[in-house]
């Protein structure tokens, strides 16, 4: 009875360890990075205002958000909505009745009220980054696009741009502001960074290998149910080693923020919707022959196939360890049995 309780307790420990490792990484992946807006003051009237694109930084296209430092269990900077009575929306600006700030202008991903955010003090640049703009409602005029953007290909529902000296990390709201600077209302458009699409698929093999190792760790526990002595110690040591491998694999994964869901990282419907839009745009005749598009498609296909193979492949070390332990255990017992017969 005591041995069974110990075994069940070891299973609970394994599950707790795996969930703790995963929860830590998910917290890092899901932390939105935000850029704050500079409050401007009109000299003639003394009115304080913000640029219009500060509205809807959470991804909804509406509402103003500010960063508030809070203590307690979830200490850090959080995004909170501003009372609509504290600002007035005009066709070209957001006039502040009460200035509190700092106010969020752009975010790397959508967020919810009260979510922790990382406020960026500066941004870096990356040369020759390709952006994909998808227009679900049809063709939009791109005549007012920023001069740093070069249209590489365009069809009725999407366009591929070369963004020179694009600020990083990629933020969809900032990209929209460059594409449609004269558009004073939220446009029905989604913008994606091809570099971040590549980064996402580059992470898939690591995630699937970690999943396979995690399954292998649990399988080792199952195979160890009736073992004792050195064979049990062998499997236990291998289970600990696989846990460490899962930890380091997930530590090396940095999922691109702009492609993640607003609340739940396991919201697979979000990924289905986003990548359906992206690859539907890639299939357009005007885009599918472009070298950047072909590179992303080739990488996505290769990494996806590798990721699928690594799920069962990740459990292979556990299987080999169990077989080796069983072999060593049996080999140790054979001489004893033979000696008894003699």
Image (cartoon, rainbow, N blue to C red):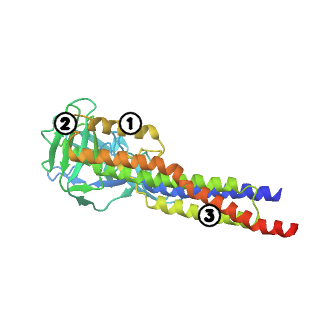
Q: Position of residue 112 (x, y in %)?
A: 43, 45
**CB under 8 Å between callouts 2 and 3?**
no
Compared to 161, does 225 lie above or below?
below
Say which residue label 3 marks: 238
Q: Nearer the viewer, residue 201 or 159?
A: 201
Query: Is 136 situated left or right of 235 in this image?
Result: left
Query: Is 288 situated left or right of 10 in this image?
Result: left
Furthest toward the top, the residue is 137
Q: Position of residue 269 (x, y in %)?
A: 44, 37
Q: Secondary structure at mark 2?
A: loop
Q: Position of residue 158 (x, y in %)?
A: 23, 36
Residue 61: mark: none
Q: Please identify the quadrant where the N terminus is shown.
A: bottom right
Mark 2 or mark 3: name the one nearer the start of the chain.
3
Say which residue label 1 marks: 273
Q: Secondary structure at mark 1?
A: helix
**Foreground disc of the pair 2, 3:** 3
């Amino acid at each position: 009875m005591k041995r069974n309780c110990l075994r069940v307790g070891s299973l609970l420990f394994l599950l707790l360890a795996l969930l703790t490792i995963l929860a830590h990484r998910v917290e890092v992946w899901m932390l939105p990075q935000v850029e704050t807006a500079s409050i401007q003051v009109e000299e003639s009237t003394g009115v304080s205002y913000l640029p219009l694109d500060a509205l809807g930084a959470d991804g909804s296209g509406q509402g103003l958000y500010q960063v508030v430092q809070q203590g307690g269990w979830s200490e850090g900077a959080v995004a909170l909505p501003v009372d609509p009575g504290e600002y007035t929306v005009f066709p070209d600006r957001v006039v502040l009745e009460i200035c509190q700030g700092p106010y969020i202008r752009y975010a790397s991903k959508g967020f919810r009220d009260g979510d922790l955010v990382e406020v960026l003090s500066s941004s870096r640049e990356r040369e020759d980054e390709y952006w994909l703009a998808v227009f679900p409602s049809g063709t939009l005029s791109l005549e007012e696009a920023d001069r740093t953007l070069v249209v590489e290909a365009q069809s009725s529902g999407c366009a591929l741009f070369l963004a020179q000296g694009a600020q990083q990390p990629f933020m969809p709201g900032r990209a929209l502001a460059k594409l449609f600077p004269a558009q004073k209302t939220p446009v029905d458009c989604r913008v994606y960074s091809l570099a971040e699409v590549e980064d996402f698929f580059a992470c898939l093999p690591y995630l699937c290998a970690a999943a396979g190792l995690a399954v292998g760790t649990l399988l080792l526990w199952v195979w160890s149910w009736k073992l004792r002595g050195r064979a049990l110690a062998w499997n236990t040591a291998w289970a600990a080693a696989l846990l460490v491998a899962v930890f380091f694999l997930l530590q090396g994964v940095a999922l691109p923020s702009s492609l993640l869901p607003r609340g739940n990282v396991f919201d697979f419907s979000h990924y289905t919707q986003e990548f359906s839009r992206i690859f539907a745009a890639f299939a357009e005749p005007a885009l599918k022959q472009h070298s950047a598009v072909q590179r992303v498609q080739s990488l996505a296909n290769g990494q996806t196939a590798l990721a699928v193979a690594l799920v069962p492949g990740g459990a292979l070390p556990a299987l080999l360890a169990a077989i080796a332990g069983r072999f060593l255990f049996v080999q140790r017992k054979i001489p004893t049995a033979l000696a008894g017969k003699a």
